[in-house]
Amino acid sequence: MKPITIDQATRDPKLLGSVFDWYPEQLRLLGSVDGPERRHIWNLGRQSGKDLMLSAGAVHNCALRPDLDLVLPAGMVRDVLVACPRRDQAQEFIATAAVHIEGSPLLRQHAEILSDRILFELPRTDEAGKPYTAKARILALPANARTTRGHRASMVIFNEQAFLDESGGPGSDEALWRALTPSLRAFGTRAKIMCSSTPNGTSGKFYELCEQAENGWKSTVYEHAATWEIVPNVTPDEIEEWRDELGQSWFDQEYAAEWVDGAGRFFDLTALRYTDGPALPATGTNWVCGLDPATVRDRFGMAIVGQSIEDPEVWLLGAAGSLETGSTGRLMDIDAETSTFKRNLETCWTAMAPYVPHGLRIATDTAKAQAVRSFFGRKGIEPELVSLKGEEMKAAYISVKTRIQDESLRLYEQPDLMEDLRTVQMRDSQQIHLPRIRGRHCDTASALVAACQMLRENAYAPAAAPMIPVAVPYSQFGEFG
């Protein structure tokens, strides 16, 4: 079997051309991967089909390149590695690749699709004419350099690469680049690197690679395109609505794929020193759990803040994070919505419970306030409403910003919180703006500010004593922390 080019595959309804109606510019971008260049760097606007194109590239390289199967000894598995910022994004990438495969009568009979990988067993013929079965797989990996070594890959994909540095340790973009690219060595000049993202400020590995590529980096194809340059049916009215929703800076970054330094960011997290992880309950007192409840569209945010036992002027961040609320941006039936909301409340309680013996109050937004108060009231804790608007909201965010900068609020690199803090804006009107981007609405940041506001207004208010004994070990924070 001769190799099939990706251009051929995406135009063939029996391969990658049956499920999606490809736009001409998407086909052009994918076709460029057939060229001899090793690196393909795509700086593209939001909703331009990046995952759709990258997953097609992964399936093509994995299943339709018999020449690559001959490189490794018989029985060895060839990999296509995909680095994604988060586990849920890695699973979504596999789901998109699965759609390509299930739409192909030729490919689906040779594939086994799991949540984090796709395994192919492909009938091949070696150079001597002897039949054999080649094994290849697509592995989608959440960003962690410690778990991405030891593979033999013919292609490495960095998905949303500008957002791989949300944590500065083993999940950083630079560490992943160093860990993954050597896995291509066995395939020499036939190996491919695909880097794709929307910009995320003027720093990080993706920005560095784009700069190199624009300056004529050898064996590199660089593509820069706004959303409307790839998706031809975007109307001028839609573009103006996006600009109005996000503001000019965020619009330029998210949809025009322009490099915007800071993009009007309110919090500056550069050069900040972080703790190793969530503060343990016994290290603090007067704990407050801030909640930003949600049922659909946004995430359910939570952050626990308390005063240090050693120095009450120093505040500590305990368990924090955000939870999925179902099919983000899609309609849910009322039973599914209620079930997901209750499950998220239970998950939050699992994270909160270890802090209760050390004094815990709950600060919640007005959204779903009755349901929140009912749930935690049965646990023996009455949540208090913290609804921040206008100047009060601005003052609360300024207070948190000041504490972060002078390190009297000690943070650890919780990925949800880091992403949310980087998203918060101060608009020209001097009002705090919380953009809704990538299915997020600064949910963990809002929970953090609510907790800090309650702690600032009344640091020593007595916490409620729970009616239900707490049996959760202090070291267990459920899905948070």
Image (spheres, helix red, strand yellow):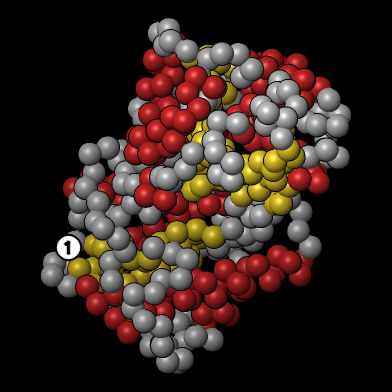
Task: Name the residue located 31 percent from the left edge and 46 percent from the top edge.
Answer: 169
Q: Quadrant of residue 244?
A: top right
Mark 1 secondary-structure assignment: loop
Q: Is residue 109 left or right of residue 295?
A: right
Q: Which residue is mark 1?
A: 313
Task: Name the residue located 56 percent from the left edge and 79 percent from the top edge.
Answer: 375
Spot occupied by residue 21 in the image (x, y as percentages of width and height): 82, 27
* Residue 99 appears in the figure: no
* Residue 111 appears in the figure: yes
Q: Nearer the viewer, residue 387 or 202?
A: 202
**Residue 181 vertical placement versus 379 (above, below):** above
Q: Is residue 244 left or right of residue 447?
A: right
Task: Name the residue located 29 percent from the left edge and 81 percent from the top edge.
Answer: 358
Spot occupied by residue 164 in the image (x, y as percentages of width and height): 43, 39
State which quarter of the image contains the C terminus.
bottom left
Task: Name the residue located 38 percent from the left edge and 39 percent from the top edge.
Answer: 179
Q: Residue furthest left?
A: 310
**Residue 119 vertical placement versus 178 (above, below):** below
Spot occupied by residue 455 in the image (x, y as percentages of width and height): 31, 66
**Residue 154 vertical placement versus 170 (above, below):** above
Q: Is residue 299 left or right of residue 422?
A: right
Q: Nearer the viewer, residue 82 or 79?
A: 79
Spot occupied by residue 369 in the image (x, y as percentages of width and height): 57, 69
